[in-house]
Amino acid sequence: MKNIKKNIGLVGLVGLMGLTVASCDLDLLPLNDVVLENFWTNKQDVQSVVSSCYLGLQESGCVEKMILWGEGRSDNIVEGQDVDEEIKNMLKGNMKTTNTICDWAPFYEVINRCNVVTMYAPSVAEKDPNYTNSDLAINLAEVKTIRALCYFELVKAFGKVPFTFQASIDDDQNYLLPQTAGELIIDTLIMDLESCKNSAQSRYAHDMRKSSGKVTRSAIYALLADLYLWRASDANLDVSRQKEYYQKSIECSDYVMRAKMDEYKLDEDGELVKSMDMDVYADYHFPLLAEEKGGKNSNGPLATNAIFGKGNSFESIFELTYEDTQDDAKQKNEDVSRLYGNSTSQGGGRSQQLSANDQLILEAFKKTDVYDDTKVFSCPTDYRSIASFKYDESEIFKILKYVVASNKAGSEDKYGKVVSRTSSSWVAPQHSTDQDVRSSGQRTEGWIFYRITDIMLMRAEAETCLAALINPATTETGTIALDAENKQIAVSEAELRSIINSDSLLYQDAFNLVSAVYMRSNPGAWDNSKCRPQANNYTSYSSILALVELERQRELLFEGKRYYDLVRHSRRDGNTNWFKTKVGSKFSQASRAALAKMNLMDFMYLPVLKEQMKINPYLDQNPIYYDEEDVVKN
């Protein structure tokens, strides 16, 4: 693993050498040419390396992999324009061990920076009285969370990977490691985060940009909720352990939701309420940003603009934040711009390599359309069907999420006058003809790791799965009766305790969580019940789980989540049957041999890059890719 062997112990020294962290090649500075002890002496030294851990996630490589691994392989994505050959092969299911998309080095570089901080920061606390134990605890919580985020991404993508918390700081050090089972890695990450989850900052008051752009307690709890959910979704676990992990996931999700509720209630200036969907708040007792305000004269999609356009919104838990500047010396989000597009690509020049799957909308909406669980988008009320991508019968479906800085409104042929909750002259949302698409020079869109609706839907999934384990009989149709009048989400510790051991209350809360997220994005459905999920249609575990997963697909389009949702479902089933129904048609151009391998669980994971196999003799290849031969098309 040569790529891990970076002299990251020197990251903090970069400023002393007149270089920028973003541009330096740390391999040019052998460790034995400097004395590390002369650097790790004060608070500023530690914080400069902590900052480099965040920067490592921003640098080209990590975001690209999160998009390609977590979204590109899913049923949300198909080929865009002028796709490079490696991405084209990935989209067709023809992954090869020489495909550099499988290169895990960017994550290991960030991991090693984090490991270096955990190694040296404690000694600084002994030297510098200005670097307090509280400062140390906060910094360790930050880097441990970033490290866990990177390892989790690797486990989800590869199944098993080399794993260590030891820093690589010496070129003579033997840093060639075998892979560790993903389950053991997840268990270790959980223990590590549980030990520091309350050490991070609660939040940065009056600074939403910093509160979501840096690790906070809510960010740690969000990651723990995700780790517990992944760990629980293992067909090989005994039922008692599955229950334990699902319950932990619910509790961690609840912590994040309560923290967000507290933030809303403690809003001293009363500004947040002006942006909230008060209909959702009235029915579900939870604050979410409104997509439109003011009935037929609305100017949505306001929430989409705030979350993905401006960024660092009220709903954000943790995201990569790029400085909003045209200055090319500043770090830019090259990966989103290259893969999803920018103003040049939207105008027909520079192209976007990925596009939305045209199966997301099968035909143009009609006012008479009704909600249908067999379709991702079935009603014209859903802002996500127009704000996330552009439906066009004659062209590729261009991705708009992240690409569009703001969807402007005002005239009837734009987003203005699109949804009326009170008027009978309802008009469906339409694509704006005045979109503020980021230029290729801007590239300042963030990348969201966790936001509150993701947490709500993770909790809904955990509740649904836990309910089925508590009462296996509910897998049969007709065994569940949801109460259409019970809409309040459990958002207090007392409420959570009252539902945690009741399968019926868990199912009810899961449905309410989905409904709250859905209704925020479908303001036109308040006066049109046919355009929203109806409680009486969900009478079994499988129907409620399908609703949760469908809502996750709608809500989290193009955010690097969908492929892993498919894998998690298959892990829970212990087979790839469901997985194949979702991605099988996408991989129809793969070789016969590749299609046959879809029956095996290992198909869902990436191969180890051949170059890494050459360097590290302890690595095992994914058995799907043994004796790999050149792909022969049908």
Image: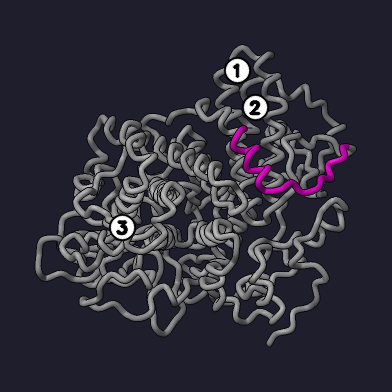
The residue positioned farthest toward the right in the image shown = 172
Residue that label 3 marks: 518
Q: Position of residue 408 (x, y in %)?
A: 29, 62
> Which one is nearer the viewer's eye here, 416 or 272?
272
Quick check: is 185 in the magenta stretch?
A: yes
Task: Give the magenta part as a residue range.
Answer: 173-191
Disc 3 marks a residue whose amino acid type is: Tyr
Residue that label 2 marks: 46
For the point 62% across and 32% down, the residue is 192
Residue that label 1 marks: 131
Disc 2 marks a residue whose amino acid type is: Val
The residue positioned farthest toward the bottom in the image shown = 634
Identify the element where label 2 is drawn: helix
Identify the element where label 3 is drawn: helix
Q: Earlier in the sequence, mark 2 or mark 1?
A: 2
Asked whether disc 2 touches disc 1, contact meaning CB atoms under 8 Å apart, the reply is yes
Question: Which is closer to the viewer, label 3 or label 1?
Answer: 3
> Which one is nearer the viewer's eye here, 102 or 125?
102
Q: Position of residue 327 (x, y in %)?
A: 53, 50
Question: Which is closer to the viewer, label 2 or label 3?
Answer: 3
| Residue 320 in view (yes/no) | no
Q: Which of marks 2 and 3 is nearer the N terminus?
A: 2
Asked whether disc 2 touches disc 3, contact meaning CB atoms under 8 Å apart, the reply is no
Direction from residue 90 to residue 611 in the image, left or right: right
Q: Where is residue 304 in the image (x, y as percent from the top left)?
A: 35, 56
Identify the element where label 1 is drawn: loop
